[in-house]
Image (cartoon, grey):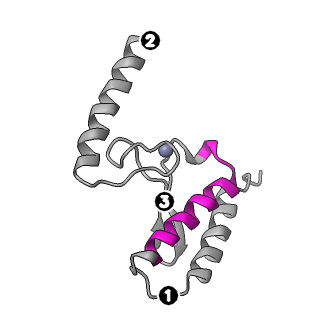
Amino acid sequence: MLSFLATKLYRTVRNLRLKSRGISHCAHCKNCWGVVQGYDIPFAPGRAMFPVCTECFPKLDADQVIAYCNELVDVWFTQGLHGEDSFEIRRDVAESVRQLKRPPVL
Ligand SMILES: [Zn+2]
C-alpha cells in the first residue's frame, strides 16, 4: 500500500514538472512521456505514432486506440505538421492497430 502511494506521489510530481516543460502525455491515462512510455503504432515504413502508453494499450480495445490515433492525426493537421492525406494516415493507422490487437496464431 505504501509503495503504491509512493509511486502515485512520484508520478504526480514528475507529471507536473514534465507538463510545465510542455511534454505531451498518453491520451488515455494523461501521464506524461517520461512517466510512462509510448506504445509505438507503425503506420508507414519508418514512421509510427504513440497516442497511448504501453500500460494503456493492452487495456483498450482496437476501436478505442483508433479513436485516440485519429485525435492525434487531427492535431497534426490542425497544426499543419503533415502535408499528406489525413484519410490515408487514418486508414493505415486503423489497419496497423487491428493487426497489433489480433490474437496471435498458435
Ligand atoms: Zn496511458
Q: Residue 59: x and y, percent?
A: 62, 42
Q: Are marks 1 and 3 in contact (CB under 8 Å)?
A: no
Q: Is residue 85 above or below residue 95?
A: below
Q: Residue at x 36, y 46 (%)?
A: 32
Magenta stretch: give its range: 58-77
Residue that badge 2 annotates: 1
Look at the image and tell me whether residue 46 can be seen: no
- Neighbour class for label 2 at 10 Å: few (<14), some, many (≥20)? few
Look at the image and tell me whether residue 47 can be seen: yes
Asked whether 62 or 73 is in front, the reply is 73
Q: What is the three-letter code of the residue carrying label 1? A: Glu
Q: Secondary structure at mark 3?
A: loop
Asked whether 26 or 44 is in front, the reply is 26
Q: Residue at x 35, y 41 (%)?
A: 35
Q: Residue 63: x and y, percent?
A: 70, 57
Q: Residue 20: x and y, percent?
A: 23, 48
Q: Is residue 48 above or below residue 16?
A: below
Residue that badge 3 annotates: 40
Q: Are marks 3 and 2 in contact (CB under 8 Å)?
A: no
Residue that badge 1 annotates: 84
Q: Secondary structure at mark 1?
A: loop
Q: What is the three-letter code of the residue carrying label 2? A: Met
Mark closer to the observer (3, 2): 2
Q: What is the three-letter code of the residue carrying label 3? A: Asp
Residue 7: in magenta span: no
Asked whether 47 or 5 is in front, the reply is 5
Q: Is residue 52 above or below residue 85?
A: above
| Left or right of residue 85, residue 60 in this image | right
In terms of sequence position, does the residue under pointer 1 or pointer 2 come before the other?
Answer: 2
Report how far apart the C-alphas of labels 1 and 2 lie in the structure.
Answer: 49 Å
